[in-house]
Image: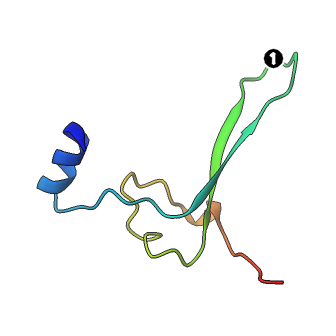
Amino acid sequence: DGSVGKLLVKLHRHACRPAHIHFRIHVPESIYDDLITALYIRGDPYESNDAVFGVKQIVLLSMLKK
């Protein structure tokens, strides 16, 4: 998958990402820049070895079944 894919192969890493949801928070006519972040689903098989190291404990959430 391009140069990054080749690099991951050489590092013996996969290119998989854990399940996550992106959020963009925008306040119209604000002095602040938009905030773009993601929340990751706890228990995903790739939670502990994300290809881009984006998962931190503070952004992990547990899903409840109803």
Left or right, 23 with reference to 12:
right
Based on the displayed image, in which of its 4 quarters is residue 41 positioned?
Answer: bottom right
Residue 18 coordinates in the image, percent (x, y)? 49, 64
Q: Give whichever of 21, 39 is nearer the camera.
A: 21
- State whether residue 4 is above or below residue 47: above
Q: Quadrant of the C terminus?
A: bottom right
Q: Residue at x 85, y 27 (%)?
A: 27
Residue furthest to the bottom = 66
Left or right, 40 with reference to 35:
left
| Residue designated by label 1 | 31
Residue 39 coordinates in the image, percent (x, y)? 64, 57
Based on the displayed image, in which of its 4 quarters is residue 32 positioned?
Answer: top right
Q: Residue at x 80, y 30 (%)?
A: 26
> What kind of residue is marked 1?
Ile
- State whether residue 1 is above or below residue 65: above
Residue 23 coordinates in the image, percent (x, y)? 70, 45
Based on the displayed image, in which of its 4 quarters is residue 29 positioned?
Answer: top right
Residue furthest to the left = 10
Residue furthest to the front = 1
Local crowd at mark 1 within 10 Å, few (<14), some, or many (≥20)? few
Q: Residue at x 69, y 75 (%)?
A: 62
Q: Residue at x 36, y 56 (%)?
A: 51
> Which colouring convention does the figure follow?
rainbow
Q: Quadrant of the N terminus?
A: top left
